[in-house]
Image (cartoon, rainbow, N blue to C red):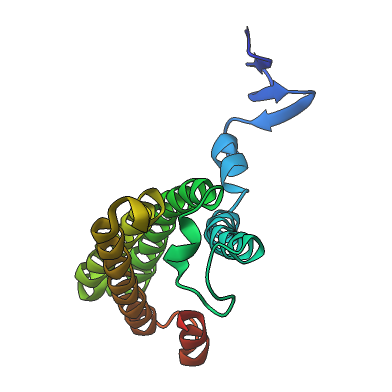
């Protein structure tokens, strides 16, 4: 049978694709998932962090270059997201980064729960993991709000989103650090360094 470039050879017991036989049983049976997962969680997290930091640094640099902020020495981030094209860049970068960030939070929570299962401590940390995941997802949602609403459009909504973002993200990082310590993931020094 031929379908979308694949042929099944019943006698050989495999799927042939582009001249290469892929197994249908045994260790390589789930090859589509392996191909998708080969991109890796690290790459997903790196893209997310790059998108958020590039947006903030890029908008800051543009604001300084164009003279849109009164001082080149650490203006408020929100001041750098108001004028065009920075407002467009911040909407794309912070909304996209916040959305991807939600996926990072959920993946890390799944990792912690899996580690807790392996250590036999799921009952001990499950509630805390779920709480920190809610804090992290809500922080990422607030980041998308900060990107979507600049301070000239609706200052109270922008400011509230920014404050809640920092509070929720600090809670997320604190509880995640505590969970990692409870589960013995890494050393205390490396975990503290990552948290900082």
* Residue 29 seen: no
Work out which quarter of the rendered image holds the N terminus and state it.
top right
Say which residue appears at 45% left-offset and 51% top-offset: 100
Residue furthest to the bottom: 189
* Residue 99 seen: yes
Please name whichever residue, 62 or 41, is drawn nearer the observer in this view of the structure: 62
Please name whichever residue, 32 or 49, is drawn nearer the observer in this view of the structure: 49
Please name whichever residue, 77 or 171, is drawn nearer the observer in this view of the structure: 77
Please provide percent x and percent y for residue 157: 25, 57
| For residue 42, side relative to residue 154 (left or right) | right
| For residue 176, side relative to residue 26 (left or right) | left
Say which residue appears at 41% left-offset and 49% top-offset: 99
Please provide percent x and percent y for residue 22: 68, 31
**Residue 4: quadrant of the picture:** top right
How many circles with numbers are drawn on the protein? 0
Please name whichever residue, 164 or 46, is drawn nearer the observer in this view of the structure: 164
Say which residue appears at 57% left-offset and 80% top-offset: 73
Above or below 11: residue 126: below
| For residue 117, side relative to residue 23 (left or right) | left
Say which residue appears at 65% left-offset and 25% top-offset: 14
Above or below 36: residue 50: below
Please provide percent x and percent y for residue 162: 33, 65
| For residue 188, side relative to residue 106 (left or right) | right
Above or below 196: residue 153: above
Residue furthest to the right: 19
**Residue 34: quadrant of the picture:** top right
Residue furthest to the top: 1
Please provide percent x and percent y for residue 123: 20, 71
């Amino acid at each position: 049978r031929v379908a979308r470039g694949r042929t099944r050879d019943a006698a050989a017991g495999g799927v042939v694709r582009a001249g290469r036989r892929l197994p249908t049983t045994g260790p390589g049976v789930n090859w589509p998932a392996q191909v998708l997962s080969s991109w890796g969680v690290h790459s997903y997290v790196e893209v997310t962090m790059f998108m958020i930091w590039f947006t903030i640094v890029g908008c800051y640099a543009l604001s300084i270059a164009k003279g849109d902020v009164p001082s080149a020495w650490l203006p408020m981030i929100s001041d750098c997201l108001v004028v065009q094209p920075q407002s467009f860049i911040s909407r794309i970068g912070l909304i996209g980064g916040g959305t991807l960030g939600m996926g990072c939070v959920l993946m890390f929570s799944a990792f912690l729960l899996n580690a807790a299962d392996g250590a036999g401590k799921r009952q001990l940390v499950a509630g805390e993991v779920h709480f920190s995941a809610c804090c992290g997802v809500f922080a990422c949602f607030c980041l998308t709000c900060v990107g979507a609403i600049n301070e000239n459009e609706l200052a109270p909504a922008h400011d509230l989103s920014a404050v809640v973002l920092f509070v929720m993200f600090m809670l997320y990082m604190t509880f995640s650090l505590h969970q990692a310590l409870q589960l013995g993931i890494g050393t205390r020094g490396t975990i503290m360094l990552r948290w900082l």
